[in-house]
Amino acid sequence: MRLLVVDDEPDLRELYMLTLLREGWQADEAGSVAQALERMAQHDYEVAIVDMRLPDGEGNDILAWAQARRRAERIIVVTAYGSAASAVQALKMGAFDYLTKPVELSQLRQVVRSALGQRMDAAPTPAHAPAALRALVGESVPMQAIKQTLQRCARGMAPVLIQGESGTGKELAARALHELSNRAGGPFVAVNCSAIPEHLLEAEFFGYRKGAFTGATSAHEGFFAAATGGTLFLDEIGELPLSMQAKLLRAVQERKIRAIGETAESAVDVRLVSATHRDLQRCVSDGTFRQDLYYRLNVIALTMPPLRERLDDLPLLAEALLGRIRRDHERPGLRLQPEALQRLRRFGFAGNVRELENLLQRAATMASSDLIGADDLEAVPEPAAAPAAAPAPADAATPRGADPGHPGVAAAGDAAAEGGDDTARLAAYLDAVERELLLQALRDSALDRDAAARRLGLDPRQLQWRLQRLHLDDAA
């Protein structure tokens, strides 16, 4: 393994060199941009460790030179403390990772090992890439762009922010990113940030030692420690309160965490991937999301397209979902008529792929045979063309109780009864009652989801699922 160290401070250069040599790696050194480019023109290196500030230029000059020539080196940049903009810019240019001065030698060795592992497996094999992307069903132009981006950004350690409406497959994309990277052998830890009570967030993220607080009868490692060597996926990152955002920012910047009750920090080795259905830029403007954390998380941005923008994928998606329904219900002959597929194209799919799956589940249940026709879909209420930006006032649009004679409930029943199907009318009525109960619990709890879940006797994940199913996710 041949490495290159680029730094204009002789003492630091010597320290890095000794550290690398003790690990059994061969290393060359350079004190300027010109010397580094001369060395790189003469040799191919597996990894280059490059200081950002050099006498005759910047580390990004070396990075740009290497990128323009499609060099294979994994470049790790070293930035001064507090130089977040420089680190983010380097990552966007294609740097593998960054270190912040003063560099801890254990962290240097850790990042170099990770880069060497990625360098030896720089790209997925032809068989590996399709396998990792198989869960992302679709060959439309938007989905091809998503898959290509995932393959490119899997090669580094830059944080990735996946945005998109609920039901578009954000977690599937995060899992594919993990499986395409050299971290595929490590853990993939998925965290739903909206499902954790605020007072437990720090303990769940960073862990705690035994006896750290009342009830801590044993040590708990936390999400960061559990994801060591792999990928930490933070779903619904926009739901984190500001107090926790500050703690997460430090962990992202410093690559260190301190468990509750511990006196010393410990280094972390995770690839961070985040996701949200919210517009985080708007949240930054509103003051509900920290700009510096958004800047750190949004190094590589990925937006999952809604189903209504990739209807060409509808036949493949419907077949994949029907395949799951066939297995679950032991109905091997279940299939869609062509007319039913055409009917599906006219749906708005406010809930995207999740909405399609629910619709097919209902249609399969209602169909009199294994052949699902357009009439079986006609009985299913058609959603709006696009998700609403905000819920209408509860007094104006929400049934005020379970009384079937209430106008709101009657309207829901009438909408579902166009095909004269009693089963559909019952389903619409029950949905209307459940919607009112959920909204009332949220109102009584001042929009505190955890309190609303306790009021209803649900856990937070169950409440979240119900809000998404009834398209109330933005109501709280």
Image (cartoon, grey):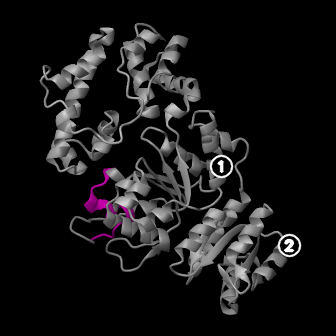
- Kind of residue sitting beneath label 2: Ala
Task: Give the class, few, some or many, for how many residues have Cα within 10 Å of label 1's Cα (few <14, many ≥20).
Answer: some
Instruction: Count every numbered label the image shows and give the total.
Output: 2
Write the residue at 52% across / 15% down.
Answer: 335
- Marks 2 and 1, Cα distance to the nearest angstrom? 28 Å
As drawn, 390 above or below 229: above
Q: Is residue 172 magenta?
A: no
Query: In this rendering, would 442 be left or right of 207?
Result: left
Q: Are marks 2 and 1 in contact (CB under 8 Å)?
A: no
Question: Which of the labelled discs sits on residue 41, or is there none?
Answer: 2
* Residue 18 visible in the snapshot: yes
Q: Which residue occupies the foreground of this view, 208 or 456?
A: 456
Q: Position of residue 326 (x, y in %)?
A: 48, 20
Write the residue at 30% across / 8% down.
Answer: 420
As drawn, 303 above or below 105: above
What stretch of residues is rendered in magenta?
Answer: 195-211
Q: Of helix, strand and loop, which one carries label 2?
A: helix
Question: Which of the labelled discs sits on residue 358, or is there none?
Answer: none
- Kind of residue sitting beneath label 1: Gln
Q: Is residue 202 magenta?
A: yes
Q: Of helix, strand and loop, which one carries label 1?
A: helix
Residue situated furthest bottom in the rendering: 11
* Residue 337 visible in the snapshot: no
Write the residue at 35% across / 20% down.
Answer: 381
Q: Which residue is mark 1?
A: 151
Write the residue at 73% across / 76% down.
Answer: 24
Q: Position of residue 129 (x, y in %)?
A: 67, 44
Q: Which residue occupies the foreground of this view, 427 or 16?
A: 427
First-in-chain label (2 vs 1): 2
